[in-house]
Amino acid sequence: MRLLPAMLVLLCASYPAVAEEDAAALWAALRAGGHVALIRHTATIGGAGDPPGFRLDDCATQRNLTEEGRGQARRLGETFRAEGVPVGKVLSSQWCRCRETVALMGLDPIEPAPTFNNAFTFRDRVDELTAGARAIVAAWSGPGTLVVSTHGANILPLTGVMPEEGGVVVVKGDPANTAGLRVVGRILTTDY
């Protein structure tokens, strides 16, 4: 188990540092299109993972958004509209909390994207999920911004950044980068 912290340090060191850009610059990047907004689902009832025996086809068996999380999702969607972000496509993990986040943002149509399914649950498939996510991000050039609603356990191995619930990591495909993408910066929940 001591190996996991060392692996995380190495993983984070292999990615470029998150740019020290302010929220206004990040919203401008999203307005320009060709970027990807990786959204960690908004606030949930807490904990990690889901209750034993959860099922993807039954939201009542999963960890779900709280009223705070629902409010965060609505505010984030309002900010996307107020900032004039052109949304080209919306992808989501099949988990209810991710789908509900983008639905409450008012973004549709929402396409299920299994490569963004919960890497915490699928620990044995993290490399496969990350490779699939990296390919999608690297290929995105627009038009507009690609919005992805996923989990922190998916965003971390992809970007080296662990966003808070409701946090957004803005990335752009970058074939010159060994990771295939460049982290542009983070939008915190206090920025919307």
Image: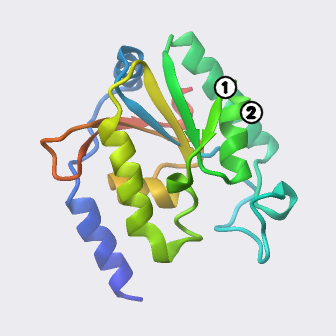
Residue under the image location 59 percent in, 14 percent down: 81
Task: Name the amino acid type tagged 2.
Answer: Gly
Are circles 1 and 2 on residues that touch, CB within 8 Å?
yes
Res 9 quadrant in image: bottom left
The residue indicated by pointer 1 is 75
Q: Is residue 47 left or right of residue 25?
A: right
Name the spot of residue 17 as percent of width and height, x first: 23, 47
Vertical position of residue 153 compared to residue 43: above or below: below
Name the spot of residue 83 as percent of width and height, x first: 51, 13
Q: Which quadrant, please, contains the C terminus?
A: top right
Residue under the image location 36 percent in, 28 percent down: 35
Q: Is residue 12 left or right of residue 156?
A: left
The residue indicated by pointer 2 is 71
Residue under the image location 38 percent in, 23 percent down: 142
User: 10 Å neighbourhood of mark 1: few (<14), some, or many (≥20)?
Assistant: some
Of helix, strand and loop, which one carries label 1? helix
Q: Residue furthest bottom?
A: 1
State the count of labels.
2
Res 185 quadrant in image: top left
Task: Name the amino acid type tagged 1.
Answer: Arg
Q: CA distance from mark 1 to mark 2?
A: 6 Å
Name the spot of residue 118 as percent of width and height, x first: 57, 61
On the question of residue 34 being in view, the answer is: yes
Q: Is residue 27 left or right of residue 45?
A: left
On the question of residue 43 being in view, the answer is: no
Vertical position of residue 148 compared to residue 62: above or below: above
